[in-house]
Amino acid sequence: MNLKAMKTREAELKAEGRALMDAADAAGRDLTAEEEARFTAIDGELEDLAGKISAAERAADRRRRMDGSSVISSTGRVEVGADRATLDPRAGFRSLADFAQAVQRAHPQTPNATVDARLATMYQASPTGFMREGGSNDGYMVPAEFRNRIWELVLGGDNLLSEIDSEPTTSNQVNDLSDEWTPWGGTGIQAYWRSEAQQMTATRPNVSPRSVALNELYAFVLASDELLEDAPRLNARLETKAAAAIGWKLDDAIQYGNGVGKPLGWMNAASLVTVPKETGQTAATLVAKNVAKMFSRLLGDSVGRAHWRVNSDVLPDLMTLVIGDKPIWTPPNGFVGAPGGLLLGRPVRFSEHCKTLGALGDIVLADPKGYYGLTKEGGVKFASSIHLYFDYGLQAFRWTIRFGGQPHLKAAVSPANGSATKGHFVTLAARA
């Protein structure tokens, strides 16, 4: 697990721990024995992660010292093994708004135009991480800390990018080999019984080439002079809303991308398992048997990782599902607090990406690790320019990220016994 994944896991565990305590506080009670056991387990895993994160950060710092060059710091001391971006990731700016205002003042047509000394050092030859772009779009790369802040916000909250099987890459296209072998299949590596002195049968891995292209996702935003002068609003709108827009598009592509100029989402992949509705089932309904059949079509190794993704329109049907007179799902504390809880032992998450009740995709049982994603190293690139829109009193901000992905499986898996295929992603057919 890399440093980013460890920090993501740390955030997830802390959120789960807070949710346990909040639920108990809302009900005016102590943690139940089951909740206490889970809280203890979370605490133990957090302690273990803290040590690993600390070790990974020390290793990363050691590598930066070995890779960097000698730089004179603002105190006049020579700092060995770090560049200016490492020593001062803000480049001397207090906030993103402070940086934006400096860029605005640097335009030669601005009355009393001045190039801020902090900007002047950002495109000298020696530093790395800060640069002035060339061409008609002449502008400034945003200081590292403000770029990283956007990436942290993209990865924050309920997002899929931190949960899928993701790898960084320096390339815009990655070619590798996929292996969709099963121990009961008739191809790939096999095991055989043999009698004494009988010749062995040789087998080979059943691999096939796979190519994943990384496509560019961007947010291009224009900010007025009035907004530039209001630092708190500028920071909130640029950082929070740009990150939310990028995060939404990434999640939507991971689920619904068509693979043309964007990732291939699991809902459009040949490996998606679609469970038929029940005979005579009323339109726009969800019944207990739908849920049971969906769970039965999930691959065995996905059971411990999968979660339910549900449109909130499904909530009334979900809360009234029964077997006999017993409800099969209830949120923690019934109608007290926000819904959530477990359905057949797996968490329920409500998502605006899911379709409305009765449509294909209103409820999905998903194992995010069944999706393979590639992110261009460096995360979100963030640049600012005033030149193109100076006469309109506007400043342009641009965020770009390259991402590619597709499900690991090319097709649903045939079971060892039976005819119903299985997969990492299972949905329910439309009930129109």
Image (tube, grey):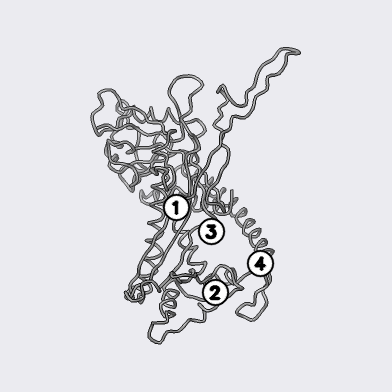
Element type at mark 4: loop
Q: What is the number of the mark on residue 18?
A: 1
Quote the CA–CA distance across marks 4 and 2: 17 Å
Q: Earlier in the sequence, mark 3 or mark 2?
A: 2
User: Which one is in front, 72 or 46?
Assistant: 72
Q: Residues within 10 Å of mark 4 (few under 14, many from 20)?
A: some
Name the spot of residue 328 as percent of width and height, x first: 35, 32
Sequence-wise first label, 3 or 4:
4
Q: Disc 2 marks which residue?
A: 123
Q: Amino acid at mark 2?
A: Tyr
Residue sitting at x 48%, y 31%? 299
Give the mark nearer the N terminus: 4 vs 2: 4
State how far apart marks 3 and 4 are (Cα). 17 Å
Report how far apart the C-alphas of labels 1 and 3 lie in the structure: 31 Å
Q: What is the distance, in whole Å, between disc 4 and disc 1 at their CAs?
A: 40 Å
Mark closer to the observer (4, 2): 2
Q: Which mark is residue 68?
A: 4
Amino acid type, residue under disc 3 in the picture: Gly
Q: Residues within 10 Å of mark 1 (few under 14, many from 20)?
A: few
Q: In the rendering, which numbered label is found on residue 378?
A: 3
Q: Amino acid at mark 4?
A: Gly
